[in-house]
Amino acid sequence: SEMDWKPDAALPPVPCFPGEMNQVFLNIVVNAAHAIEASGKKLPGKITITTSKSEDGFVEIRISDSGTGVPESIRDKIFDPFFTTKGVGKGTGQGLAISRDVVVTKHGGQLHLESVEGEGATFVIRLPMTEPGGEPEMDVGL
């Protein structure tokens, strides 16, 4: 898969727990790569990451893939612990559940899915530009 990184250079540093947010990004990017591989499309797949500042005081990180999208029938379940679409021994069903906990509970942010079946998926992470609960380890420029 190809990676396309489009950061907004004007973004201020975002107060966060960087190790935990790195795990969130890794979980979503690995899932995107698996979705592209499972799609069976012949062209190289593409993962696009963009960052921007919203009008309501959040930084948005959008991670999009060119896979097949998430079927409507499972969209409400993908953030549930132990839910996986992967075969036995290939997925624990913990990645998105943990990611949502880190973004929502530990950072006061939001994590949601935008998907069109057959056209890929986009995970949108919204982090407040104010301090999360507790003291962050450091500010990370996204």
Image (cartoon, rainbow, N blue to C red):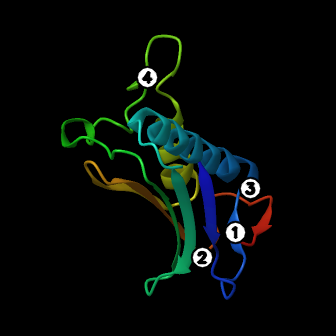
Residue assigned mark 3: 18
Residue assigned mark 1: 15
In the image, 41 versus 88, the foreground residue is: 41
Tell me the residue at 61%/51% (across/down). 25
Sequence order check: which comes first, mark 2 or mark 4? 4
The CA distance from mark 2 to mark 1 is: 7 Å
Q: Residue furthest top?
A: 88
Bin the neighbour count of mark 2 within 10 Å (Cα to Cα): few under 14, some 14-19, many 20 and up: many
Q: Nearer the viewer, mark 1 or mark 3?
A: 3
Bin the neighbour count of mark 4 within 10 Å (Cα to Cα): few under 14, some 14-19, many 20 and up: few
Identify residue type, mark 3: Pro
Residue 5, quarter of picture: bottom right
The answer to whether the residue labelled 2 contacts the one labelled 1, judged by CB atoms less than 8 Å apart, is: yes
Residue 61, quarter of picture: bottom right
The CA distance from mark 2 to mark 4 is: 35 Å
Sequence order check: which comes first, mark 2 or mark 3? 3
Identify residue type, mark 4: Lys
Bin the neighbour count of mark 1 within 10 Å (Cα to Cα): few under 14, some 14-19, many 20 and up: many
Residue 9 lies left or right of residue 125; in this view the side is: right
Q: Nearer the viewer, mark 2 or mark 4?
A: 4
**Which labelled disc corresponds to residue 129?**
2
**Which labelled disc corresponds to residue 86?**
4
The CA distance from mark 2 to mark 3 is: 14 Å
Identify residue type, mark 2: Met
Sequence order check: which comes first, mark 3 or mark 4? 3
Q: Nearer the viewer, mark 1 or mark 4?
A: 4
Sequence order check: which comes first, mark 2 or mark 1? 1
Tell me the residue at 77%/69% (across/down). 139
Tell me the residue at 38%/55% (across/down). 112
Sequence order check: which comes first, mark 1 or mark 4? 1
